[in-house]
Image: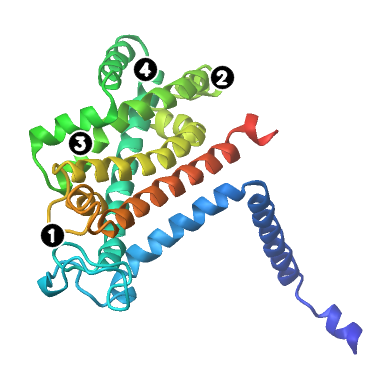
Amino acid sequence: MVDVIQATKDPVLDEDEKANKSRVKKAFTLLRKQPLGAAGVAIVIAMIFMAVFAQFITTIDPEVNDLEFMLTAPGEKFFLGSDQFGRDLLTRIIFGARTALFVGFTCAIIGSCLGLVLGVSSAYFGGLFDLIAQRIVDVIMAFPLIILALAVVSILGGGIENVIIAITIPFIPQCARVVRSSALAIREIPYIDAARALGYSHTRIILRHMVPNVMAPFLIMLTSFLGQAILLEASLSYLGLGVQEPTPAWGLMLQGGAEEFAESAPWVAIWPGIAISLAVFGFNLFGDAVRDTLDPKLRSQ
């Protein structure tokens, strides 16, 4: 009877089970080799969870003032204390994750994608187009990130939309420069000449034959931009040029509490600072793990 049951067992299910076990084994191997990367992934997942389920984690409105409980120390009513307007700091930190992730992912994705297209196109066409594009990239990269972002947001004004534009612009040349260096080598591979000989359009060659082969440096730049975007958004909000009240944002929470209440109510500045540090730390660790995984030189070590 046992032999009959074993004989009738579906071989497809066995293959699926083996594949699932193989994936689990690879995941554990990766966690063992990249423990810091795993910590970064855990922080990123926690931030995403807070941002998505913020309204279920806490029922307190992060924008409602309660002047009766101004600067209340951490306790039963306010687990992390309250700010100068009587708002719950824990609630504002949880909802502030939405602002940080929205700005971070939007700026990183848009900036990286535009830089990808610019870098691959510059390497593919070469000549005058490459010369002009790279000189523009040099000019933009001559300015530090925060200085260029400050200049753009000072011209456009505050608000989350203008902050995204101000942070995205410096990311484009950085990604374009890295991607171009990889695309230059790919352009010399014979299959690109074969695609040209077959009469393929420039758009098809760039998107279908060159872009897939520069995805490793592109993904590395994308993950590194996430932490930078969150830090830049917090810096601009702290300076009063980013997100405006009463929107919950970590940098905006620091603006009113870092100096004025440093001695009387230090928790007003401590918790947003810790949130920013953990977010940047987590995304940087995650980016380092992605780099070590995708880079063949580091992967072979």
Which residue, given by chain and number where applicable, does mark 2 sit on? 190
Which of the marked residues, 2 or 4, is nearer the chain's N terminus? 4
**Label 2 CA crowd tier, 10 Å (few <14, some 14–19, many 20+):** few
Q: Viewer-proximal residue, 194 or 83?
A: 83
Q: CA distance from mark 2 to mark 3?
A: 40 Å
Foreground: disc 2 or disc 4: 4
Contact, CB < 8 Å: mark 3 with mark 1? no
Q: CA distance from mark 2 to mark 4?
A: 16 Å
Q: Which mark is residue 166?
A: 3
Q: Amino acid at mark 1?
A: Pro
Contact, CB < 8 Å: mark 2 with mark 4? no
Place residue 76 in its image quadrant.
Answer: bottom left
Decide: is 292 above or below 25.
above
Place residue 91 in its image quadrant.
Answer: bottom left
Residue at the (22%, 54%) spot, across then down: 253
Quarter the N terminus occupies: bottom right
Which of the marked residues, 4 or 1, is nearer the chain's N terminus? 4
Task: Let me know if residue 49 appears in the view.
Answer: yes
Q: Viewer-proximal residue, 115 or 140?
A: 140
Which residue, given by chain and number where applicable, does mark 1 sit on? 246
Which residue, given by chain and number where applicable, does mark 4 sit on? 125
* Residue 285 at x, y percent in the picture: 50, 44
Foreground: disc 4 or disc 3: 3
Relative horizontal placement of residue 95, taking residue 33 as reference (left or right):
left
